[in-house]
Image (cartoon, helix red, strand yellow):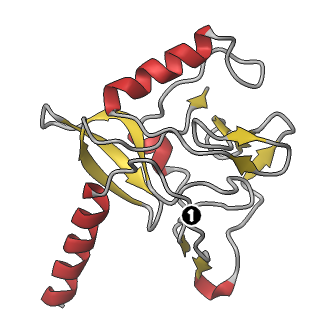
């Protein structure tokens, strides 16, 4: 049991230490408990490239920042950003007219980002029907860590939450209330 815990800690450290850097596109086969895909009843999608979470009331971008919604899928290369720059990207998007008719997009808190994790699945631990072609990587949250040079992120390979060095480059998915 102790050896298994050490392997899990090592895996978490590896995932948290592996920044996006250029974000190569890797196609993984999502695996879900019971061989069923993630449930698709929680999120209500629209044609503008957003989804509303019926449990939290939050509206999410379907694509990672840098990708583009083409009506059926997310295309392009996700933006990779340091933590502080993530806030600048959100502000810049809003100043340039926003997205899907809204100009109040923001970096989500850790608990908001964790609410997207599909616990039954991995590779990614996310509803792929509503968040297609999402990079299987870490996404910054707005939540700082108690250590001054770190902030919190969620890695969607397995859905774990980790602290990351604020200078590391991770993906962004913006949200609005």
Q: Is residue 151 visible?
A: yes
The C terminus - image quarter: top right
User: Mark 1 highlights which residue?
Assistant: 118
SS state under label 1: loop
Q: Is residue 163 above or below residue 158?
A: above
Residue occupying image coordinates x 71% and y 47%: 75
The N terminus - image quarter: bottom left
- Rendered location of residue 160, percent (x, y): 37, 61
Number of callouts: 1
Residue occupying image coordinates x 60% and y 54%: 134
- Rendered location of residue 2, percent (x, y): 13, 87
Q: Quadrant of residue 28?
A: bottom right
Residue occupying image coordinates x 47% and y 51%: 23
- Rendered location of residue 54, percent (x, y): 71, 45
Q: Is residue 51 visible?
A: no
Q: Is residue 55 above or below residue 126?
A: above
Q: Is residue 13 above or below residue 122?
A: above
Q: Is residue 52 above or below residue 13?
A: above
Judged left or right of residue 121, residue 10 is left
Front residue of 58 and 63? 63
- Rendered location of residue 39, percent (x, y): 71, 67
Judged left or right of residue 89, residue 150 is left
Residues packed near mark 1 inside 10 Å, few (<14), some (14 to 19) or many (20 plus)? many
Judged left or right of residue 11, residue 160 is right
């Amino acid at each position: 049991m102790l050896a298994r815990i050490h392997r899990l800690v090592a895996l978490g450290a590896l995932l948290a230490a592996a920044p996006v850097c250029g974000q190569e596109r890797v196609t993984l086969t999502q695996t879900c408990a019971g061989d069923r895909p993630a449930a698709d009843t929680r999120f209500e999608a629209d044609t503008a490239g957003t989804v509303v979470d019926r449990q939290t009331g939050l509206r999410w971008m379907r694509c990672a920042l840098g990708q583009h919604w083409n009506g059926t899928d997310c295309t392009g290369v996700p933006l990779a950003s340091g933590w502080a720059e993530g806030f600048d990207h959100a502000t810049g998007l809003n100043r340039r007219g926003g997205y899907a008719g809204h100009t109040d997009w923001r970096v989500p808190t850790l608990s908001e980002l964790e609410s997207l994790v599909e616990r039954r699945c991995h590779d990614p631990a996310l509803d792929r029907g509503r968040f297609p072609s999402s990079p299987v990587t870490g996404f910054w949250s707005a939540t700082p860590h108690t250590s001054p040079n770190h902030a919190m992120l969620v890695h969607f390979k397995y859905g774990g939450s980790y602290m990351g060095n604020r200078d590391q480059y991770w993906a962004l998915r913006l949200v609005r209330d």
